[in-house]
């Protein structure tokens, strides 16, 4: 039993070092939802962003804020969106995006419904058609080497069905926070064929 004690101490020290190294490199994610609805507009923004001040979560968060800023400007077809501060809380960023979309949709929906009721007697008796936006950016998958976020938006502005858009899947390296744009080695396409 005495011979096992030094081995046990060494094993415990190694486990402690491994856990402490993982904690230094690891970071958490904050998920927030902002909702608002009126007679003319409904907006729901769900946003999940990395938390932490080290370079990796900071780089990922900064890029994701830019993605959401562009997506929100595209949804509203306006360029007046105030630049997102990536250091703001996730709740504040979700509220900033949601309020911007809600304000734009409220104005556009009021105008569309006014024109619709003025130009069609049948439409005057119909209920108001609100504009709706369901915007989501959430973490979908994570390993020790990378993390994947999924960006979607479902926009309804009248008509038969909503318009689906978004940035899709965004994969980031956890080594440096860089967006991975090529996950397959194009020089090895022939080698990949049997797997496909």
Image (tube, helix red, strand yellow):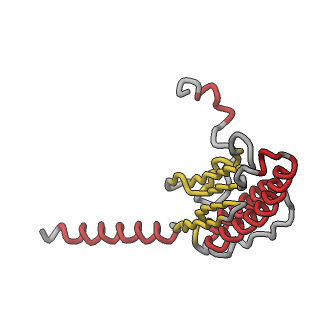
157 relative position to 90: left or right: right
In percent of width and height, residue 69 lies at: 76, 62
In percent of width and height, residue 104 lies at: 79, 63
- Residue 167 to residue 107: above or below: above
Foreground: 113 or 167?
113
Labels in figure, total: 0
> In the current view of this chain or complex, which residue is farthest to the left?
1
- Residue 190 to residue 140: above or below: above
Q: Quadrant of residue 29?
A: bottom right
- Residue 89 to residue 70: above or below: below
Foreground: 101 or 125?
125
In percent of width and height, residue 189 lies at: 64, 29
96 relative position to 16: left or right: right
Q: Quadrant of residue 58?
A: bottom right
**The C terminus appears in which quarter of the rendering?**
top right
Q: Residue at x 46, y 66 (%)?
A: 22
Foreground: 96 or 84?
96
89 relative position to 119: left or right: left
Q: Quadrant of residue 92?
A: bottom right
Q: Residue at x 12, y 68 (%)?
A: 1
Q: Residue at x 72, y 69 (%)?
A: 99
In percent of width and height, residue 174 lies at: 58, 59
109 relative position to 93: left or right: right
Q: Residue at x 66, y 61 (%)?
A: 43
């Amino acid at each position: 039993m005495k011979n096992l004690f030094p081995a046990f101490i060494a094993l415990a020290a190694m486990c402690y070092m491994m856990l402490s190294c993982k904690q230094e490199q690891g970071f958490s994610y904050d998920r927030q939802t902002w909702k608002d609805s009126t007679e003319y507009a409904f907006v729901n923004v769900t946003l999940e962003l990395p938390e932490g001040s080290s370079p990796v979560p900071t780089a990922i968060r900064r890029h994701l804020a830019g993605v959401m800023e562009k997506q929100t400007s595209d949804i509203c077809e306006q360029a007046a969106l105030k630049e997102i501060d990536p250091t703001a809380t996730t709740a504040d960023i979700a509220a900033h995006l949601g309020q911007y979309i809600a304000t734009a949709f409220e104005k556009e929906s009021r105008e569309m419904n006014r024109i619709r009721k003025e130009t069609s007697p049948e439409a005057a008796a119909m209920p108001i058609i609100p504009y709706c936006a369901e915007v989501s950016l959430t973490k979908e998958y994570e390993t020790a080497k990378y993390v994947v976020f999924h960006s979607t938006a479902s926009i309804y502005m009248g008509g038969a069905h909503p318009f689906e858009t978004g940035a899709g899947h965004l994969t980031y390296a956890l080594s440096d926070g860089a967006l991975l744009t090529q996950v397959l080695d194009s020089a090895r396409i022939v080698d990949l064929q049997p797997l496909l």
